[in-house]
Amino acid sequence: VAAAVLRHAPTQAEGEALLAELKAMTDEVAIADRLQLSGVCSHADVEDGFSRCVGWWNKSQERDVDYIVKYILEECADMMEVDKRFRVLQPRVGRRLHGRGVLTERVLSVAQTRCHEYWARVTPGNVALVVANVTGKSATWE
């Protein structure tokens, strides 16, 4: 059942819509037909299949977030460029990522948060602190 749900709903939003549609059905044969399965399929089977899919969808979104963060951090030299890239990506919500999942608001939001956290750690003030610590330990440092 989980494989059938994933075939019909590659994203969690689509999966939730499919689950709502299947819950509204009362005939177990109709549920199986909707999922293109042979035999019968109960609501409990659908719930179990859906719960198995949630982990896969979460991993998929995590891979998408990692992909965007890696791309943005490789391309941007400062936080202003990062914000500019995210503004460019905003209208593209709903499109597929290069052979990956779909760009969603959640994926974009989590990726932007991670980029902000990265740049909060790597700032000129932090670099100045590291330089001061290194030069303070070495008397011959110039």
Image (cartoon, helix red, strand yellow):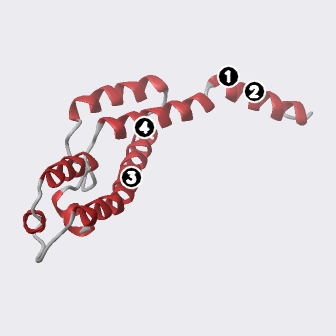
What's under tag 2, amino acid-wise?
Answer: Leu
In terms of sequence position, does the residue under pointer 4 or pointer 1 come before the other? Answer: 4
Give the Cα separation between the discs numbered 3 and 4: 12 Å
Up-down: is 41 above or below 25?
below
3 vs 1, front mark: 3
Q: Earlier in the sequence, mark 2 or mark 4?
A: 4
Amino acid at the residue labelled 1: Gly
Residue drawn at (75%, 27%), measured in percent from left and top? 129
| Tag 1 and tag 2, C-beta contact below 8 Å | yes
Q: Which residue is mark 3?
A: 58
- The three-letter code of the residue at mark 4 reads Val
Sequence order check, earlier mark of 2 and 3: 3
Q: In the structure shown, which secondary structural element does the residue marked by tag 2 occupy?
A: helix
List the residue tagged with mark 4.
110
* Residue under numbered circle 2: 129
Mark 2 vs mark 4, CA separation in Å: 28 Å
Q: Position of residue 94 (x, y in %)?
A: 20, 40
Q: Name the outermost residue toward the right.
A: 139
Q: Secondary structure at mark 1?
A: helix
Q: Is residue 45 left or right of residue 77?
A: left
Query: Looking at the image, can residue 47 be seen?
Result: yes
Of 139 and 12, which appears nearest the observer? 12
Circle number at residue 125: 1
In the image, what residue occupies the spot 35% across and 25% down? 84
Please say if 52 is above or below 57.
Answer: below
